[in-house]
Image (cartoon, grey):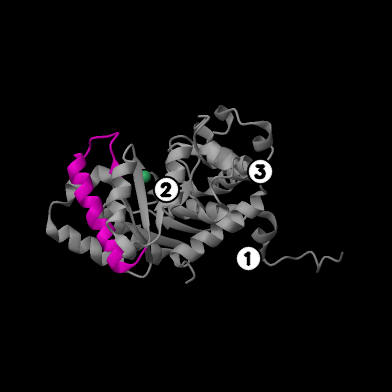
Amino acid sequence: MTSEETQIPEELKGCYENLIVIDIGANLTNKKYGRDLDSVIQRAKDAGVQKIMVTGTSVRNSKEALRLTRLYPGTIYSTAGVHPHDAKSMAEEELWAELRQVAAAPECVALGECGLNYTKDFSEPHVQRAVFKRQVELACELQKPLLVHEKAAQEDVLRILEEGGARLPPVVVHSFTGSAEQGLRYLERGCYLALTGYVCKDKAADGVRRLLADRLLPLDRLLVETDSPFMYPNVRASKLPPHVKSCLTERSMNFVNRYCTFQRNEPCALPAVVELAAGFLGRSAQDVALATAFNALKLFGLSH
Ligand SMILES: [Zn+2]
């Protein structure tokens, strides 16, 4: 080979080395990224993360997430929502008007995260339900997908979603941490499941690993996200089966080991999450990357 032939244009270099992946949920408005967001996003790109959806969890940070889409056009997309923990903050009607305005922006590609969390009592359950319901209605009206957060509240979540009827847009259960049985119930209702580094943590025989290993979760319903700064994929402590461990590449683990910690996970950890999911599924990481990226592009329309 001549030296000319080996010269690969800078922007194409990643294509040969990386999985191409899309992080459908990262809390990059978190103050933990206040000092070095540029580097965090550059690292994500270096790792093969082509696009990142920045999660809104309150009116204020939904606005902030939308602002980030303008700073990183084509890379960052936003969502607009009120987390169940923050449900009690939505007492004023004015805030709903603001949420609606942010959610209607073209760079905002989904409603949420919203939902119910009965394991914490930051907001009372009846307040959580009322605030979730209104966001489901807003998603129906704007016809944007819903990112649902659910902890110990599956029945109520499904009941409220059902009220959306035929107008209900696609539903993604974000950061799924339930049992295989609960996962199946969501899949039966047509929902997508988004997996995180939690696949390391959950060693339950009937948990998310079984959903993958028994291939109960079809590739066309699978999405991946880091949920940064949370859900650090703690590969060392997770006693992974050898066939899963062998799917982790040195390249992906370098990003995790060099840049991510329990205190602050980053979108650059996403290729490792994809490799883990692929390991449990018994598929190639390339197939899982391609399928999840395609699902994200299609579902959220991340083309512009
Ligand atoms: Zn969540």
Disc 2 residue type? Tyr
Tell me, yes or no, if residue 254 can be seen here: no
| Residue 136, quarter of the rendered image | bottom left
Residue at the (53%, 53%) spot, across then down: 44
Disc 1 residue type? Glu
Span of residues in magenta: 116-144
Judged by depth in the image, the label closer to the viewer, 1 or 2, is 2
Q: Which of 173 and 268 is in front in this view?
A: 173
Query: 267 left or right of 89?
Result: right
Q: Mark 3 points at which residue?
A: 282
Q: Which of marks 1 and 2 is nearer the N terminus?
A: 1
Image location (x, y in percent) of residue 217 = 53, 47
Judged by depth in the image, the label closer to the viewer, 3 or 2, is 2
**Magenta-drawn stretch contains 143:** yes
Judged by depth in the image, the label closer to the viewer, 1 or 3, is 3
- Image position of 221 with respect to 156: above or below: below
Residue at the (54%, 52%) spot, across then down: 43
Q: How far apart are marks 3 and 2 (CA)?
A: 22 Å
Residue at disc 1, secondary structure: helix
Q: Earlier in the sequence, mark 1 or mark 3?
A: 1
Image location (x, y in percent) of residue 181 = 45, 39
Q: Distance between the residues labelled 1 and 2?
A: 39 Å
Q: Name the residue under label 1.
A: 11
Q: How far apart are marks 1 and 3 (CA)?
A: 31 Å
Q: Neighbour class for label 3 at 10 Å: few (<14), some, many (≥20)?
A: some
Residue at disc 3, secondary structure: loop
Q: Name the residue under label 2.
A: 186
Determine the residue located farthest toward the right in the rendered image.
Answer: 1
Residue at the (22%, 56%) spot, across then down: 134
Image location (x, y in percent) of residue 269 = 54, 45
